[in-house]
């Protein structure tokens, strides 16, 4: 009986070679299926349309971070100087027994003149210019240059200026609304065309008037496509 069991035990276990062959077949089938999935996915990625190469608002002009920060800090400094003249210097001169009465007014004027001058000369300063691109012009650089050769005058453009307290202000308009100018003794080189009385938008009394004068320099190297801004200027000058 024991001899029969000893003889029959090896026959019940499968051979080692066949087990290895089975594992090899399973490994090959898994590897083949995995390669198929990877190749199919790679092919589908190649056939999928590429994303837009440019954003909807393309930066075509950048005045530089240093200039923008300097203008904003200069405006804030003149405002603080005017506040100091009105709240500290003028009352001290007014109540001082050895000071004349006009000393307080002179202190207020001395603080107001720098603030008004800086606000007047730096108001048209443009730090950014963004151009709104159509869908087909955002696909590639070739499509962008093809569209930029003849930019439609109805294309919208965003000009960002710096307000008195250093906050940015975006003025959106069409290219046809701009014209070249030499206003304020050359401080501004672009101006917004006056609108007819029927197309003017009524604003609340507490809101400031829209920006009408702009100054755009020659610093285009920091923008993504400097040549596009040259085409925009040609369109503005030709209109």
Image (cartoon, helix red, strand yellow):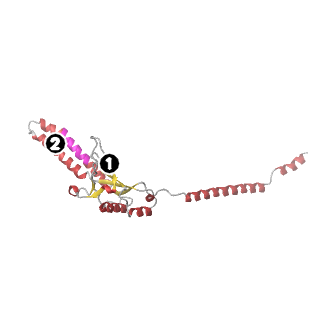
How far is disc 1 from disc 2 in space, using C-alphas?
Answer: 28 Å
Front tag of 1 and 2:
1
Residue 37 location (% of width, % of height): 63, 56
Magenta stretch, main secondary structure, is helix
What label does residue 168 carry, if any?
Answer: 1
Which SS class for mark 1? strand
Mark yes or no: residue 63 visible: no
First of labels 1, 2 by sequence position: 2
The answer to whether 237 appears left or right of 40 in the picture is: left
- Which residue corresponds to the image point at 10% horizontal and 41% vertical from the top-left? 102
- Which residue corresponds to the image point at 21% horizontal and 41% vertical from the top-left? 83
**Front position in the image: 184 or 203:** 203
Residue 54 location (% of width, % of height): 43, 57
Q: Residue furthest front?
A: 198
The answer to whether 3 appears left or right of 228 in the picture is: right
Q: Residue furthest right?
A: 1
- Which residue corresponds to the image point at 16% horizontal and 45% vertical from the top-left? 110
| 79 in the magenta segment | yes
Mark yes or no: residue 89 visible: yes
Quarter placement of the C terminus: bottom left
Which SS class for mark 2? helix
Quarter placement of the N terminus: top right
What label does residue 147 carry, if any?
Answer: none
Looking at the rendering, the stretch of residues picked out in magenta corresponds to 75-87
Look at mark 2 in the image and give the residue it sits on. 108
Residue 198 location (% of width, % of height): 29, 48
**Front position in the image: 218 or 83:** 218
Residues under numbered marks 1 and 2 in contact, where contact means CB atoms less than 8 Å apart? no
Residue 154 location (% of width, % of height): 36, 56
Q: Residues within 10 Å of mark 1 (few under 14, many from 20)?
A: some
């Amino acid at each position: 009986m024991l001899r029969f069991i000893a003889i029959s035990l090896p026959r019940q276990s499968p051979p080692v070679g066949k087990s290895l062959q089975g594992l090899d077949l399973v490994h090959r089938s898994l590897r083949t299926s995995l390669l198929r999935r990877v190749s199919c996915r790679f092919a589908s990625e190649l056939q999928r349309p590429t994303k837009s190469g440019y954003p909807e608002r393309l930066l075509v002009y950048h005045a530089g971070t240093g200039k923008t920060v300097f203008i904003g800090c200069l405006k804030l400094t003149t405002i603080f100087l005017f506040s100091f003249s009105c709240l500290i210097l003028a009352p001290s001169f007014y109540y001082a027994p050895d000071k004349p009465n006009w000393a307080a007014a002179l202190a207020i004027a001395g603080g107001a003149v720098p603030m008004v001058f800086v606000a007047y000369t730096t108001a048209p300063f443009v730090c950014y210019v963004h151009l709104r691109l159509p869908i087909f012009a955002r696909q590639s650089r070739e499509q962008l240059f093809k569209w930029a050769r003849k930019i439609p005058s109805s294309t919208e453009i965003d000009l960002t200026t710096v307000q008195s307290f250093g906050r940015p202000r975006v003025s959106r308009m069409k290219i046809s609304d701009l014209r070249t100018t030499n206003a304020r003794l050359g401080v501004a080189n672009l101006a917004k065309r006056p609108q007819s009385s029927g197309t003017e938008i009524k604003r609340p009394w507490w809101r400031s008037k829209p920006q009408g004068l702009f100054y755009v320099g020659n610093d285009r190297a920091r923008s993504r496509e400097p040549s596009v801004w040259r085409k925009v200027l040609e369109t503005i000058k030709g209109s």
